[in-house]
C-alpha cells in the first residue's frame, strides 16, 4: 500500500508565496521521478515541475523562474515553493511519484490539494 499526501489547501493573494509538500508513505523500495501537476477548472492536467533522484529539475513554461521543486530522499517528500503567484495559478495541485513498491514499478498520485490565488 502506497500513499501520497499533499499539504494544503491554500488561499493567497496575487504576488504572494505558498509552499506545498507531499509525503510518500507505505511499502516503498525506491522512488525515481517525483513531480507536481495541476489542473484548473475546464482545463487538462498540466505538468508543473519534475525532479529526479539526483536533483535534476524540469519546469513547465508558465512557472519557470517562479516555482522551485525540491525533494528530501531520506524523508520521501517532495516540495513546491511557489513565488509571485498569479490568479492563473489557481488549480488543484497533484503530487506524482514513479516508484517501486515490492517488485512493482508504477506511477502513484496524491488526491490533490486546492490552491487559490485571488485578491
Image (cartoon, rainbow, N blue to C red):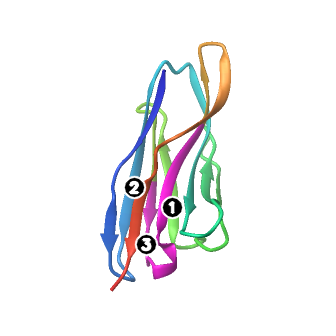
The residue to which callout 3 is attached is 83
| Mark linked to residue 20 | 2
- The residue lying at 54 percent from left, 69 percent from top is 41
> Based on the displayed image, in which of its 4 quarters is residue 61 positioned?
bottom right
The crowd level at tag 2 (other Cα within 10 Å; few <14, some 14-19, many 20+) is many
Gap in angstroms between the C-alphas marked 3 and 1: 8 Å
The answer to whether 17 appears left or right of 103 in the picture is: left
The answer to whether 86 appears left or right of 47 in the picture is: left
Magenta-drawn segment: 80-97
Tell me, yes or no, whether the highlighted magenta stretch contains residue 95.
yes
- The residue lying at 40 percent from left, 61 percent from top is 114
From what the image shows, is residue 13 above or below residue 9?
Answer: below
Instruction: Decide which of 62, 71 is in the foreground and name it.
Output: 62
Instruction: Decide which of 28, 118 is in the foreground and name it.
Output: 118
Measuring from the top left, give residue 2's x and y in whole percent.
Answer: 49, 26
The answer to whether 113 appears left or right of 60 in the picture is: left
Gap in angstroms between the C-alphas marked 3 and 2: 12 Å
- The nearer-to-camera label among 2 and 1 is 2
- Chain-order first, disc 2 or disc 1: 2
Measuring from the top left, give residue 4's x and y in whole percent.
Answer: 46, 37
Instruction: Decide which of 43, 75 is in the foreground and name it.
Output: 43
The residue to which callout 1 is attached is 68
From what the image shows, is residue 77 above or below residue 82?
Answer: above
- The nearer-to-camera label among 3 and 2 is 2
The C terminus: image quadrant: bottom left
Q: Callout 1: helix, strand or loop?
A: strand
Amino acid at each position: 500500500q502506497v500513499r501520497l499526501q499533499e499539504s494544503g489547501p491554500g488561499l493567497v493573494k496575487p504576488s504572494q508565496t505558498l509552499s506545498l509538500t507531499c509525503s510518500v508513505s507505505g511499502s516503498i523500495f525506491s522512488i525515481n521521478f517525483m513531480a507536481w501537476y495541476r489542473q484548473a477548472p475546464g482545463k487538462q492536467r498540466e505538468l508543473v515541475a519534475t525532479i529526479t533522484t539526483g536533483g535534476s529539475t524540469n519546469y513547465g513554461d508558465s512557472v519557470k523562474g517562479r516555482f522551485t521543486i525540491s525533494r528530501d530522499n531520506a524523508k520521501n517528500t517532495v516540495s513546491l515553493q511557489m513565488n509571485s503567484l498569479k490568479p492563473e495559478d489557481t488549480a488543484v495541485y497533484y503530487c506524482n511519484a514513479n516508484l517501486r513498491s515490492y517488485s512493482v514499478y508504477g506511477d502513484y498520485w496524491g488526491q490533490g490539494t486546492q490552491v487559490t490565488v485571488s485578491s
